[in-house]
Image (cartoon, rainbow, N blue to C red):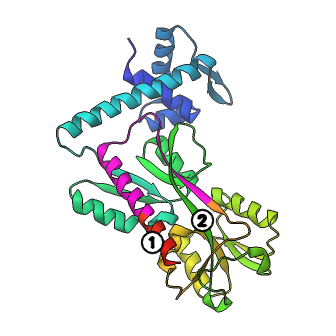
Amino acid sequence: MLSLRQIRSFVAVVEEGSFTRAAQRENATQSGISQHVAALEERLGATLIERASGGVTPTPAGRAFYGHALAALRSLDAGRAEVAARAGVLDGEVRAGLMPSFTRAAAAPALAAFLERYPHVPVEIVEGYSGALSDMVRAGTLDFAAVPAGSNTQGLRVTPLARDREMLVSNPARGLAHRSPVALAELGPLKMIVPGRANIRRQRLEEYFATNGVVIERLLEMDAMFATLELVACSDWVTVLPGVICVGDADGRARHVNALHEPALHSEFVVVEPARRALNPAAEAFLTTLRAEIDRLSAEFAAAG
């Protein structure tokens, strides 16, 4: 008979690509994980994992079984959540990963609304960038994370969250009419603040600059959102950010915001969660609240301009 421990061990090995990392994720020993996978292979009568000096990979049989294993684990979690819901209990805690794009404007009102309704549910919010947040979700440290589309999705379930227009953010002294669309190619050499290369947005921005003839005088790498905003507010440096993070600058006092035009640039954001596990009711409820707040802010920002 197959055991849940064997299935979870196998899924961890496939997703981590290593018995050592799988053991760390499952809070087990490497030999224990290896024994569980070996017992599963013996029970199924097939080799599921190819072991080599450079790492481990699933065999064709392993890839086929991996899909069924994920479905089984997720179904069990969903069943547990449904039983809790029928008992009138908001089961679980919230461990969410959010990019700075969402923590500046959306996180606080979403948290306030959620905690007023569910005051006894433990909530943990981690701010970070796509790669680190996706890794934490994959490892089970976070229930879900909001990240840009296009991140590595191995071992993750991905659902759409938001589509947002990119904005040029600049000091009002630059003289751009607040909230008017701008073509970056017409603005001359720009001193541009960009995220670090580990951030998936970096490549998209550089491709946009190169494809559309945007002249960059200097690039400054900065993975610190509030420092970026403060530097823009007190200097001639500019940056490009998703619209949802610019809600706080709708009045144009500290910074002017201008939608990129000719051509427009949009960002797609998604929610990632472990493919092997359904969201617990508490995390699902917070995600629903967060989605509603992001939608509200997007509509409010669009109406204001």
For badge 2, the amino acid type reads: Arg
Q: In the structure shown, which secondary structural element does the residue marked by tag 1 occupy?
A: helix
Q: Residue furthest left?
A: 87
Q: Quadrant of residue 239?
A: bottom right
According to the picture, the residue beneath numbered tag 2 turns out to be 165
Bounds of the magenta segment: 267-295
On residue 147, the disc is none
Percent of width and height locating residue 152: 60, 44
- What is the distance, in whole Å, between disc 2 and disc 1 at their CAs? 14 Å
Q: Is residue 184 left or right of residue 66?
A: right
According to the picture, the residue beneath numbered tag 1 turns out to be 300
Q: Quadrant of residue 78?
A: top left
Which circle's residue, 2 or 1, is located before the other in the chain? 2
For badge 1, the amino acid type reads: Glu
Percent of width and height locating residue 69: 46, 24
Q: Nearer the viewer, residue 94 or 269?
A: 269
Percent of width and height locating residue 121: 25, 53
Q: Is residue 33 visible?
A: no
